[in-house]
Amino acid sequence: MTYVKPAFRHPEAAKNKLGYTRKEYEGALSTLCAGCGHDSISAAIVQGIFELSIPPHRVAKLSGIGCSSKTPTYFLGNSHGFNSVHGRMPSVATGAYLANKDLIYLGVSGDGDSASIGMGQFVHAIRRNLNMVYIVMNNGCYGLTKGQDSATADPGSINKSGHTNLFETIDMAGMALELGASFVARSFSGDKEQLIPLIKAAVSFPGFAFIDVISPCVTFNNNKGSTKSYDYVRDHLETVAELDFVPLAEEITSDIASGESGRITMHDGTYLQINKLALDWDPTDRISSLTKIHRSRMNQEVVTGLLYYEAERKNLHDILNTVDTPLNALEYYELCPGNSVLQTINAELR
Amino acid sequence: MITVSPVVYQALTCRQEMPAGVNRKIVVGTPAAIFFHHSKSLKNRNFRPKIFKINCLEPTNIKDPEYFHKVVDCQYACPAHTPVPEYIRLIAAERYSDAYMVNWESNVFPGILGRTCDRPCEPACRRGRVEKEPVAICRLKRVAADFKGEVVSRMPSAPETGNGKRIALVGAGPASLTVARDLAPLGYEIDLYDEQPLGGGMMRSQIPAFRLPEEVLNEEVGYVLGIGGISTHFKTYVHSLKDLLESGYDAVFVGTGAPRGKDLSGLPGRKEIQANIHIGIEWLANVAFNHVDKIGKKVLVLGGGNTAMDCCRTSRRLGGTDVKVVVRSPFDEMKASPWEIEDAQHEDIPFFNLHNPKAFVHENGKLRGMLFEKVAAQYDDQGKRSLVPTGEPDIFFEADDVIIAIGQENAFPWIEKDLGLEFDKWGMPLVDKITFGSTLPRVFFGGDAAFGPKNVITAVAQGHQAAVSIDLFCNGEDLYNRPDPLTNLVTQKMGIHEWSYDSTVVTDLRYKVPHASKSETLTNRKKEVELGFDDLLAFKEAQRCLNCDVQTVFTAERCIECDACADICPTSCITFTHNGEEEDLRGRLNAPAQLLSQDLYVSSPLATKRVMVKDENVCLHCGLCAERCPTAAWDMQRFLYNTAKAGTPCHV
């Protein structure tokens, strides 16, 4: 058994704008089951942050409990991390984000952590529009406790022991849309060419960016009859759009007939290049996106891609109208300006 | 002109900006248009490219023994194809005798080669491509020889009744001894001829004892002669091939080496002075056989090859206090092995490069020194070098003795020209590169005698092949129907994540072999300079081996395309992608695959119609792909490859 990844890397490994190779963004060797979809998502996060040339110390990883919530150990080993209580990652993220709005917050959760025990936390993080990336590694089962159906298991899905799920499912992406999230995407751990651009776009997005990633549990939920297995997802995948994250100042030289492509300009001038495939859907129209999600579910399709995008919504710090300086960087005298200022404030309230 | 649908075209051209070093060049409009879009072959695609033509790579045929052989870079580079990682693992396990026998079977002289080999394996070593220096393969071989126990009982012996065939071997160097080793156990009656008093050939006459102790040489020559069925005829110079052929041998093997050292006959002063000017290999032989035991204080050694290094270092031991090596070529282009040069420098021997010998200077019939013209190296468009005089004043070096070590040549004065054995215009026999047969059916060549001066390990490899040919020839079989190599591919899986080889990749840098002190070695020409690794150092150095013979074997039918292997691979060797032409594929793998000598391992198509492509180049053979594979589509399997020796049944 190998416990430490060999130190050598490809001698001609690509370097990003900071001169770092991917090695500087890797974490410890995974202890998840071999073939776990979560490891693929970890690799996609590593690749995405590497390609964005973000200094690792600018990122804070946050998680709760579960297989998914173990993964921050396996990526971005040089970043900040907080492995919190089951389902409580959004609270910790809220606190951290309030204290230091300058970091990039990357929350990682699972279907148990977010759709069951942490549901109450999850919905309020969306309502408040924290500026964070919220990734749910969604395998439809409780892998850490031997594969019981989770709240995201589809009705009729058969688990490894042959039991059919009798309950309705919670569609995390649909719920995020309903609650007013401004960046909602779904992807598949086995489709990095879609997942990596989505992660890059989410990290660059100035508000709550939610990605529901179907991530097969090879040990407990990769059997025939499961709707979260590699085979089932591949067979039922419907991609709303081919997309690519295009950083600022990137030239697009091809001339594409209108109706076949779209472009969403982001807050900072970067944009998402979208090649429209689903004609019944408009990623900037919440109702159209919700319809798309519902219709796909009716057709037993797993719709993936960037489902909804709205750049204009204010994030938590904008809503609260906080100062530009991160609160944790304020000096004592700024936070506690003294008795005379207190008296003034009190006088205003009388 | 190829038309591609707009959607595909966009997928082709709208790639995001990639960090430097990632090549995602996509060729559109060439006859082999590449269908490449960045989401997989998904069901609900509502487009089709208009033209869909790909010259894809065929799945790699891993049943061809040469495919995995090539992955074991050291073994592949070794002329005798010694299974290097196999014996390095045995050394790490302190199974020195086993390690010795793996070597002995393949290269006949592990103790000798462990000290003197030219080491073609080391520049090839994969480790040299992921860090600074390769594994010290050569010196580990010596460890096996140094620490082995009793091995004679494991060696073959001649059968009591022979097969009735008689073979003559001319020259008792490494090539001939290899032929004897391979043929004697098969019952051949062998006559071994050499003009020297003992066997070993150039290993005895040209390699000084401070690099190769006589006991080691005697021991390993003795193993061969001890097989039985070999009659030695030392101090016997063969004057006539015709006589030899007429004495009824079924085959004759010529392993006479390249016995004639080049001279500078045309140089002014050379004719006048005979004493104190020596030919390198002759002088070394005279030292080896105790005919010479001293030299002047001031010695000039001409030449930049390994013989020159041996001459200058021997001179330091025989009384030379001011020994200079003078070479025409630039320092970087000297032919000597870097470690030989280093050892010479360590013994305070200066090098004078770009000095062209002009004249021997003498006075009253006595050598005084030599005159050199300073030259500069110039290169034409083809990179061909010419040495041009710089016009600076000539340089004079005083010398009591001059040793000329500027190369050696073949000489076959004993082979009659009317036998039907053809020579080329340079006086070299016409020898078949596969069979090592000459134009005279019964006569075979090997070692330096076949294709000019090379090295011991090449002579051994050629000896093996000549022995195979002689055996086929004596059995009336086709010489070109060569026996297949013996191969074996065995899983190393011991448990769910356990391997029966040490898969950990250590970061230790190459360990240096300890040397005896200069005061000791320079006063005794037989004192071996290198002390060899002790068991602990040997273990540490052995752990640096990447076990390249433990192959990553991929079974496409089992793969569920979870990406675990591609994600975990430390050196980004593995990519799942659409198939394409080799050049195109090499450009769009997870890490650049620009070392064309290293193969791509391509699977048959997977469920998503993609293929697994592995660039063998810097694979660490760490087994992580197989450890992280949920379906055992990857397995680590130890590949053993042994070149067929004489007596192996041929493939029919």
Image (cartoon, coloured by chain):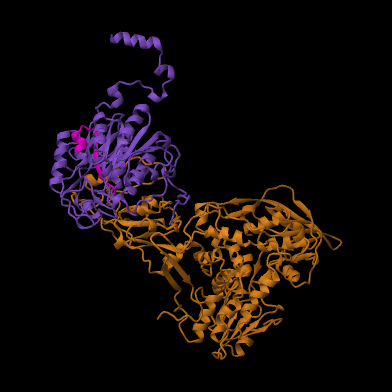
Chain colours: A purple, B orange
- How far from the left and from the top, in percent, is residue B369? 79, 57
Give the residue drawn at x 34%, y 34%.
A105
Q: Is residue A344 visible?
A: yes
Within the image, what quadrant is residue B552 found in?
A: bottom left
- Is B418 above or below relative to A111? below
Q: Is residue B268 visible?
A: no
Magenta stretch: give its range. Answer: A175-189
Front residue of B577/B87: it is B87
Judge whether residue A309 is colored magenta.
Answer: no
Give the residue drawn at x 38%, y 66%.
B62
- How far from the left and from the top, in percent, is residue A42? 35, 45
Task: Quadrant for the C terminus of chain B, please.
Answer: bottom left
Judge whether residue A185 is colored magenta.
Answer: yes
- Is A214 above or below relative to B282? above
- How far from the left and from the top, in percent, is residue B563? 33, 52
Front residue of B25/A57: it is A57
- Is A225 above or below relative to A331? below
